[in-house]
Image (cartoon, grey):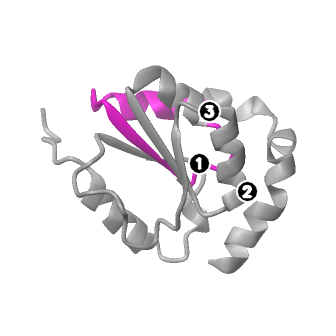
Amino acid sequence: MIEIKSFFSNRAKNWDKIHKHNDFTTAFKVSLIAKKNKGKRVLDVGCGSGIMIPFLLAQFQDVHALDISPEMTRIAAKKYPLCAVKTFDFEKKSFYPPAYFDSIVIYNAFPHFKKPELVLKNAFYLLKKMEFWQ
């Protein structure tokens, strides 16, 4: 994980310049999928510099975001002070209580995880239980 952390931290300063906001259409669509849970609290895992955050803030009452890169989280927190942004490795046991979130979004970050099964396990642990066949 150290190499991934370093990779993103080294690129954080220029991330928004490299990734011009052409991903906004897709990010907006992903946020609409998350909103279908009609929840109040959402977690953005692998938030980077915060491409999903403005869409999530527009739809949820309580938005949290995590990234492994301290530099990415610093940038995201500066851009979006209404979001609770933290530096955290999501492949480790979460500091949030179980069933804390209505929705969890992992946008463009999943391929970077070394242990995706732990990411899914942590996500299921943090998600409120819901009836899928409503």
Q: Secondary structure at mark 2?
A: helix
Measure the C-alpha gap from mark 2 to mark 3. 14 Å
Query: Is residue 57 depicted above or below 47 in this figure?
Result: above
| Residue 69 on image: x %, y % | 67, 62
Magenta run includes residue 11: no
The residue at the point 37 percent across, 26 percent down is: 61
| Residue 92 on image: x %, y % | 43, 73
| Residue 58 on image: x %, y % | 49, 21
- Kind of residue indicated by mark 2: Glu
- Kind of residue indicated by mark 1: Cys
Mark 1, residue position: 47
The residue at the point 22 percent across, 51 percent down is: 99
Measure the C-alpha gap from mark 2 to mark 1. 12 Å
Circle 3: is it few (<14), some (14-19), or many (20+) Cα within 10 Å?
some
Q: Secondary structure at mark 1?
A: loop
- Kind of residue indicated by mark 3: Tyr
Mark 2, residue position: 71
How many labels were placed on the picture?
3
Query: Is residue 101 depicted above or below 71 in this figure?
Result: above
Question: Do residues under tags 2 and 1 come within 8 Å of each other at their CB atoms?
Answer: no
Q: Which residues are magenta?
A: 26-51
Of badges 3 and 1, nearer the viewer stands 3
Magenta run includes residue 35: yes
Relative horizontal placement of residue 41, taking residue 78 as reference (left or right): left
Circle 2: is it few (<14), some (14-19), or many (20+) Cα within 10 Å?
many
Task: Residue at the far top: name it.
Answer: 58
The circle on residue 80 is 3
